[in-house]
Each structure stands twice: as structure tokens, then as C-alpha cells.
Amino acid sequence: MGQTTMPFDHTRPLNRGDYRTLALAALGGTLEFYDFVIYVFFAAIMGHVFFPPHSPEWLVQLQTYGIFAAGYLARPLGGIVMAHFGDLHGRKRMFTLSILLMALPTFIMGLLPTYADIGIWAPVLLLALRVLQGAAIGGEIPGAWVFVSEHVPARRVGFACGTLTAGLTLGILLGSLVASAMHARFSEAELVARAWRIPFLLGGVFGLLAVYLRGYLQETPIFKELAEQRALLAEWPMKRVLASHRGAMLLSMLATWLLTGGIVVVILMTPSLLGKLPGIGAEKALLANSLAVVCLSIGCVLAGSLTDRFGNGPTLFAGSGFLLVACYGFYSQIAAHPDWLFPGYALLGLTVGVIAAVPCIMVRAFPATVRFSGLSLSYNLAYAIFGGLTPMAVALMLKSDPQAPAHYVEVLALMGMVLGLALCARRRQAEPDGLKAT
């Protein structure tokens, strides 16, 4: 078997190798998440390119977001398969495979024939590629959180998860900047004709670069210890999760619901809604969104670090409270005060950073032998339900409630505060050695 690995020292400070691993993982996550979200920034154009002309605008929007949702619905399958092999054969292999499976469909999207070329087969092919993307991201994000959390000492897991989450959110920023540049460089007619392909082709190149970067990463020390101690499960890890960790699954799924609201509504949907308001417009809304994502990334690192210092429960409770206040203030006032766009959206983005507490909760909720499978099943199942259906639900709610995005996120923020209190209560009942398991 070779030389035995020394037991992992959870009391040591972060070293240069840790920072290098976090940087490479975060950068790879940025490039891969760009591939997944770039579709959102060009959703309106994709609707006109891949669906029948002269369709009602509401129908085009519903069909376009339906394909968007299909990517989320495919996440559990990809996540389950990759997590199974990740728990049995290693985190790194699946961590690299997921990004390759994302890059290829993104590049092919940029080469697809349109509805004008092949009719109904155009949206069918687009749907198939979106499903492949969903399967890839289903393994990528849980695998990334597990990977970085098992590379650092236990007392810095929050910082590691926060840094990785910040990297993922910067993928949204990259998509926003590319979208802004495309709208500035090309007219609407040029985008519809051909230029929409450029961001997808660029995404394929980004994905291949991320595959190369991940070649420099090493398997996690914790997985190596499990393998050497022959502590890996002989049975299916998913079977053990469903039999023995249903409480951890429920907690993880509810926390993921909060994460979906922050990302899907506040970051991905809000720019298109703001662009329709007088005094703002699409270009200014995208610039404000870029600022909000930068602040979100800062908020993720901050929230993750606070979980290391104060625990998951207090951080989630306080962060959700700040999100509730910021959300109410921004959405209720922005129409009357468009000059508040940049500072208001920036503050809202910063408070959305509380989502970094979510992976901290999940990686600490499952033991190492089933951590990848438990986290992946919970996260992807919740995201398939809540993340995939949220855009359509909010779009339907907007017909009767102009403040629907705010009300949706505010309810989730209240739920986050309740979960935070529950985690605080559990922590007070924990063993007296001070270990922050929640």
C-alpha cells in the first residue's frame, strides 16, 4: 500500500498549500459556474432564437425558463452518480470530471442550429444540452464544498467553504460582465443573428482551462485516511444516508432553499426586472448586478469566517435577519428612488452572502464516509425543486404582486432565522468539548 499517511492535524493554521488549493478550487468553480449561468443572461435572446417566431412574450418567457429549470431538475441524477463514486473512489476524480462534462455542452450550445434552421429540433437539442449541464453542476458544487472542507483544519472549514462559494458567485459576475460587454458591442439584431454564440463558445474554453487547473490539485487528506484505514463503506453510501441521516438531509434541504432564493431571485432574476423600471434600463441594471455580485463574494468569505468564530447557528440567524431588512428596503424603494440602485443592490448582495453558511452546515451534518453522497443528495434534490421552479413561480406571482421577488426572499430569510435558532439550541445541547458541529 506504500507509506502510511500521517493523521490529519486539525489544530494547525492554514499553510501555503491550503491557500493554493483554495485558490485553484475557487478559480475552477468560477469558470465552471460561468458555463452554467451564462444561459440566464441571454435567456430573452435564446427565447427568440430557439422558439417559434410571433409567439406571445409570456409564452416565450415560460418556455425559456422551462429549459432553465430542466438544468436544475437534472442535478440530482448527476449529483447522486458522482457522489457515489466520490465517496468510494476519491473526491478529486469526480471534481475534475464534472467540469469536463460542463465545458463540452456549453461549447456545443454555441454551435447549435436555430429554430429557423431545423424547427422544433432546435429547442429539443438545447434542452438535452441543458440537462447535461445540470447533471455536471450537480456533482461539481457538492464535490467542491466537500473537497475544500476536507483539505483544511476543522476550525477553518467555514473560511474554506466561504472562499469556494465566493468563487462560484464570481462565475455569475463573469457572466454578467460578458453579457454587459456583448450588449455594449453588438446591437439587439446582431445578438439575435449570431453574436449570442460567442459567450457559449468562450464558456467552453473557460471550462477546458478549469480542467487543466484542477490537474494540480491533490486528493483530500481525510479521504486518504479513510482509504488507508479501510473505513470506506462496502455498501452504497446513498443507502446509508437514507437509512441513518434523514434529519441531516432535512436540515440541508431547508438551508439550500434559502440559498436558492438568494441566488436565483436576488442575483439572477432581479437584473431583468430592474431593467424594465424607468430611470434604470438593462445596461445600468447589469452594471449594478456586477457590483452586487462582488459584494456577495465578499459577504460569502465573511459569513464563512464568522461560522468558524461563532458557529453556524448564530451566523445563519444574524445573516438571515440582515437579508430580511435589506431585501425589504431595496425592493420596496427602488422604483421610487432609482438613484439608490447601486448602493442598495450592493448592500443586498452583501447580505445574500449568508448563503456561505449553508455549505458549512451541510459538510458538518454528515460523517466523512457518506459526506459527498449526503450533501449531494440533499443539496441537489432541494435545488431541483426550489431552484428550478422558483423563476416560474415568481413570474406567475408577479401578475398579481409587484413585490413578489421581495416577498419570496423575505419568507426564506425568516425561515433562515428559525433554522439559525434551532442550530443554536442544538449547539447548547452538544457535548462539552466545544466542538462546533453545528
Image: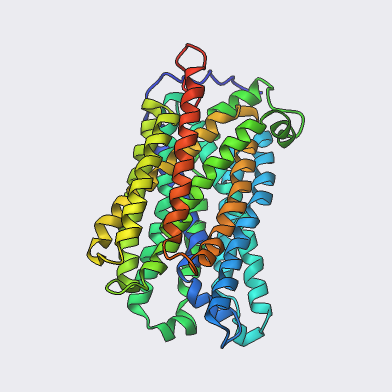
Q: Residue furthest top?
A: 432
Who's the residue at 55% across and 61% down the image? 393
Compared across the picture, whether 73 is left or right of 260 comes to: right
- Residue 302's x, y, as percent? 34, 38
Q: Please give the name of the residue rendered at 37% of the width and 36% of the height, measured from the top-left corner.
A: 318
Q: Is residue 23 visible?
A: yes
Q: Is residue 86 left or right of residue 299?
A: right
Quarter of the N terminus within the rendering: top right
Residue 164 appears in the rendering: no
Image position of 174 (left or right of 380): left
Q: Nearer the viewer, residue 64 or 390?
A: 390
What colour-coding does the image apply? Answer: rainbow
Above/below status of 312 relative to 86: above
Image quadrant in which you'd find residue 51: bottom right
Q: Position of residue 351 (x, y in %)?
A: 35, 46
Quick one: 54 or 120, which is closer to the camera? 54
Q: Position of residue 322 (x, y in %)?
A: 34, 42
Residue 72 vertical position relative to residue 241 in the rendered view, above or below: below
Taking depth in this image into account, of 420 and 217 the one nearest to the observer is 420
Image quadrant in which you'd find residue 250: top right
Q: Is residue 258 above or below residue 397?
A: above
Query: Residue 258, position in %: x, y?
Result: 49, 46
